[in-house]
Image (cartoon, rainbow, N blue to C red):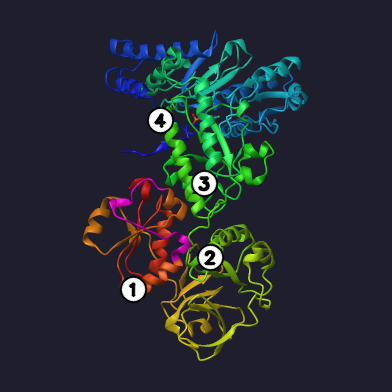
Amino acid sequence: MTTEIYLDSNATSVVLPAAIAAATDAMGQRYGNPSSTHGTGLKAKAILDQARASAARLLGVGPGRLIFNSGATEGIQTAVLSALVALRERRDAGRAIGALLVYGATEHKAVPESLAHWNRLLGLNLTLHKLPVDGNGAHDLAALRAVADQAAMICTMAANNETGVISDLTAIEAVLNETNCNACWMVDCVQALGKLKLDLSSTRIDYAPFSGHKLHAPKGIGMLYVRAGTPFTPLIMGGGQESGQRSGTENMAGIAALGAVLAALERGDTFRTHAELCSFRARIADSLRAALPGVVFNNPFDKALPTTINFAVPGLSSRELMDVFDAAEVRVSAGSACSSSKAAPSYVLDAMGLPLWRSAGAIRLTFGPLADEATIAAACARIERCGAALRASCLIPSERTAVPHDGLLQLGVEGACSWMVLDAASRSCIVIDPLPEHTTRIEAYVRCQNYQVQAVVCTQPNAGRAQLIAALGRHYNRAADADEYGWPANAAVIAVASGAAASAITVGTQVLACVPGQAQRAYLLGVADGARLPAAAVRFAFSAQITQALRDVSTERTVLCPTRDDGNQLCSGTTSATQAITTADAQLDSAALASFLQAHPDARLIDVREPYEFAAAVAPAPAGRPALSVPLSRLAEYASTWLHEEPAPLVFYCRSGNRSMKAAQCLRRLGHPQAYSLHGGLALA
Ligand code: PLP
């Protein structure tokens, strides 16, 4: 049974059951080629005609044309090609044309990319001109007025896919009329279909692309409206289908499915009303406010489609929000394209002038007009679950002190790492090599778990500890003077394995000792034996590199916690050379998991997602087995424990198999012979 709540309908939508039935019928019963003149072909042609007639009525096509194609990207291509070919012909005939290809700053990338592509290919060399939008995402009409008489083509979408912001097409049209603009006008209507009333032939819109999969039809089917008398050049030539305007045998399953959606729209008995959709949005927004303190909405609700909510939460990245929602099986998307470590800001929100944290941390939550009461109620409950998971992990403020973590914690940013040594029993901790990027996170963590920071030490001198110390306030122990590495002047002296004396500070039952005889500082962590720290007792070493001095005081089971981690290895050994691990060795297929666990009853199943993902999870662990939560940030701590135990197989898993592969490779590099990653992660399990 699926527990998934799909709230990413602006990306693509669930296919309407009637559309699936219609597609099945078009493939099973009415499989003819609509160009054939025999009975089988005529049955197929009837599907085509019905769908086109339905669309024409719904969209007010009038004397204009509707051409079936593969989707909006093709529709945009065709519209741009048509307009630009006509412009070139006009210019070649010695007539004046505008110099600018004007497009809204928040258009889908398909628009500026197509304009640039065909402009170059056709050798027009016109200038692409981005039309600004205001803070609400509305086109700047004064800016449009200023350039309208120089425009060769104008592209302004009907509703935005990231924010749902509805364009004022009437006002845009008025500007075009007032300025005697004679440019062709394309309006991308993808997000408007079924959500906004359209009467195309009563406007001066020349081209309007549509896409089936954004409104409960399958992917690969779309339509392009072309106004009567507007220039047209086919993108695809061949057998003359679609009256010679778009050759290629029609996608009949797609057209039948889209026809079923259009018929449902016409009947008005399938989709929620605008008022119902507004009430769904209000309920979700209330849940977000309650669960995620400080949440801000990036789209003005009164000027946007009710089905699109775009938000950001102070202190949380879009990656973290995406991860916790995904663990709770609520499918949303980052409002921006994001890579693994850093979210790229959304160009749509940037164009609206939003601050970087809102643009880079944006989440887009979208439902379709097919949404129902039960799904919205379930979504609200899951949002509350995500909020609780984030609070328990100290990622958002909580009134209660969280249960303290114990041991080592690794925070990483772009190859550099900060480390925290935490002792839950005494609530004391030491921070090693804090990065400025981690100041807020470390401070929130320390405050939320009520830790006292005994020392903030670095492996480099004068490495900028002041920012963190200032942020920690009363949670930093100011009693001792410290040198330029942050090392306390009142540290004790301990003998390390080389026999040398080392300066050491205590954290709980362990000591942190400064490795003697090194140009660059390195630290050792372990449980001392009286006034000695034997090599076998050194569980961790913190250092930028492996040196002989470090090897002399540690063993092959000491885990090296690097201060830089460019290779994304998390941690490594202090003695052995790093050997290459092939992905295939460490990969376990989900189909083979159950039998693997049966053959290895001592195997451990380990969830390497972050604690808030583990806490928010609604799906059981793979193979129905209990799993241990060991996020990558805690892997070094657990790796050390596993290396000191009798080796048992370790099966790591995460959402997609990426993070678990890092964990498995890390353990293999550390010498664990049986560390595996569940291939494809929970998504395929
Ligand atoms: N225009 C807008 C506003 C969209 O949201 C999308 C899809 O994301 C497209 C165009 C491209 O549509 P298609 O997937 O049909 O090519």
Image point (61%, 44%), residue name: 294
Q: Is residue 86 left or right of residue 670?
A: right
**Disc number for residue 565:** 2
- Tell me the CA gap for discs 2 and 1: 26 Å
- Point out the tag, 4 or 3, that comes first from the N-terminus: 3
In this picture, is 637 found above or below 320?
Answer: below
Looking at the rendered image, the disc whose residue lies closer to the viewer, 4 or 3, is 4
Farthest residue in the front direction? 400
Confirm if mark 1 falls within 8 A of ligand 1.
no
Residue at mark 3: 321
Q: Secondary structure at mark 3?
A: helix
Taking the magenta stretch, the answer to whether it contains residue 620 is yes
The crowding category of the residue bearing disc 4, from other C-alpha atoms within 10 Å (few below 14, some 14 to 19, many at least 20), is: few
Read off the magenta span: 617-635
Q: Are marks 2 and 1 in contact (CB under 8 Å)?
A: no
- Point out the tag, 2 or 1, that comes first from the N-terminus: 2
Residue at mark 4: 374
- Tell me the CA gap for discs 4 and 1: 49 Å
Looking at the rendered image, the disc whose residue lies closer to the viewer, 2 or 1, is 1
- Point out the tag, 3 or 1, that comes first from the N-terminus: 3
For badge 2, the amino acid type reads: Asp
The crowding category of the residue bearing disc 1, from other C-alpha atoms within 10 Å (few below 14, some 14 to 19, many at least 20), is: few
Q: Secondary structure at mark 4?
A: helix
Q: Are marks 4 and 1 in contact (CB under 8 Å)?
A: no
Taking the magenta stretch, the answer to whether it contains residue 361 is no
Looking at the rendered image, the disc whose residue lies closer to the viewer, 3 or 2, is 3
For badge 3, the amino acid type reads: Leu
